[in-house]
Every structure is written in structure tokens, then in C-alpha cells.
Amino acid sequence: MVVRDENGEIYSVRYDAVNAMLLNEFLKEHRKTNSKNRRWGSRRRKLRVTNSKLKRLLQGSRK
């Protein structure tokens, strides 16, 4: 990430490498977020189905 001179002092920063690293980290987090959102969506759908079944069962038991 940094370029050093002959004395070991930092001479410059390789911003192209920093940008690439930041982009890679952003993409990893973005993929994780998308994966979590898909799982939550699936769980919400399953919960709606379960709630519908429960309502039907409760309505049937009241008759």
C-alpha cells in the first residue's frame, strides 16, 4: 500500500491498491447483505404461510 524510499521512510501511497482493497471489502459486505436479505425474505414468506395455516386451524376449531 505504501512505497518506501531507501531509508525505509514512506515515500508515497499506492492509492490504486487502496481503492482496489476498499472495493473488494465493499463487495464482500454487499454480498453478505444480499444473502441475509434473501434469507429474511424466505423466512417472512414461511411465516406468512404458517400464520395462514394457523388462522385456518383456529377458525375450524371454533365451529
Image (tube, rainbow, N blue to C red):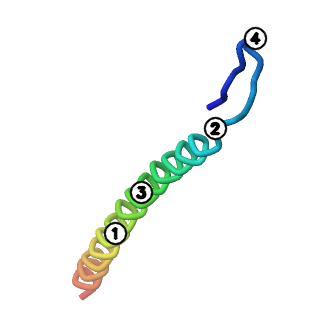
- Counting residues from the start of the chain, the first of labels 2 and 4 encountered is 4
Left-right relation of 28 to 59: right
Q: Nearer the viewer, residue 24 or 4?
A: 4
Residue annotated with mark 1: 47
- Counting residues from the start of the chain, the first of labels 3 and 1 encountered is 3
Residue annotated with mark 4: 7
Q: CB under 8 Å between callouts 2 and 4?
A: no
Q: Amino acid at mark 4?
A: Asn
**In the image, which is nearer the foreground, mark 2 or mark 4?**
4
* Disc 3/disc 2 C-alpha distance (Å): 34 Å
Residue annotated with mark 2: 14
Q: Which mark is residue 25?
A: none
* Disc 2/disc 1 C-alpha distance (Å): 50 Å
Q: Amino acid at mark 1?
A: Leu
Q: Nearer the viewer, residue 49 or 45?
A: 45
Residue annotated with mark 3: 36
Residue 14 figure quarter: top right
Q: Name the element at disc 1.
A: helix
Q: Name the element at disc 4.
A: loop
Q: Amino acid at mark 2?
A: Arg
* Pointer 3 local density, CA inside 10 Å: few below 14, some 14–19, many at least 20: few
- Counting residues from the start of the chain, the first of labels 3 and 2 encountered is 2
